Amino acid sequence: MKKLSLALSLFLSLIGCQNKTENQIKEEQPLETKEEISVAPTSNEDDLFYIKLNTIYGENGLEDYAKDASEVSGKIIKRLNGSDGSEYYLVKLHQTLEYRELNKEPLLKTDYLIVGGRFAEQPLKPGANKTVVNVAIVKDQTLINDSELDFNKAIFAGYGEATEIKI
């Protein structure tokens, strides 16, 4: 009986060591890298929606930075809090936007914009229809993993009208 108990104890301890070793090996293996950066939403999934941004006639907007950017579209993927107390949204564009900082070279690219409601009485929200928004170009891609908007990582581009679209 003692031999059986000893053998069983030895067997169980070996199984425990083996599992522990397998877990350590799995943890030490490098994670797969992906080309597209995954962004975890910081707000309720129901708050995320698709929008198109149109230039407001007579106002500065994206077309001052990017050719043929009088209308762009994308998905709001994340809410960002601003240090000024306002809410901003990270928009993943459907097409890469080529832009140039004013009076600078070379031509740059981004897949993200920041938008935020221009007027307190007309916030950007699902169901938006020509909601006037501030628009900024994300120039530093590390911004997409931040929960608070760092204004140094974006370029204020002007104003636009945001309208929810269904895809």
Image: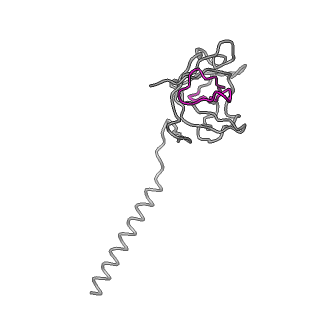
Relative to 9, is 159 on the left or the right?
right
Q: Where is residue 101 in the image (x, y as percent from the top left)?
A: 68, 23
Q: Indicate the colouring scheme.
A: one colour
Q: In which quarter of the image is residue 110?
A: top right
| Residue most extreme to the top | 58
Q: How many labels does the image show?
A: 0
| Residue most extreme to the front | 121
Q: Is residue 5 above or below residue 76?
A: below
Q: In this view, does 3 lie above or below 43?
A: below
**Quadrant where the C terminus is found in the figure:** top left
Relative to 3, is 64 on the left or the right?
right
Q: Which residue is drawn at 42% across and 64% down?
A: 21
Near-viewer residue (90 or 9) = 90
Q: Quadrant of residue 160?
A: top right
Magenta region includes residue 122: yes
**Quadrant where the N terminus is found in the figure:** bottom left
Q: Position of residue 76 (x, y in %)?
A: 54, 31
User: What span is in magenta?
Assistant: 110-137
Q: Position of residue 15 (x, y in %)?
A: 35, 69
Q: In this view, does 30 lie above or below 68?
A: below
Q: In this view, does 27 lie above or below 144?
A: below
Magenta region includes residue 123: yes
Near-viewer residue (121 or 167) = 121
Q: Residue at x 57, y 30 (%)?
A: 125
Q: Where is residue 117 in the image (x, y as percent from the top left)?
A: 64, 28
Relative to 100, is 45 on the left or the right?
left
Near-viewer residue (71 or 137) = 71
Q: Residue at x 65, y 12 (%)?
A: 57
Relative to 155, is 16 on the left or the right?
left
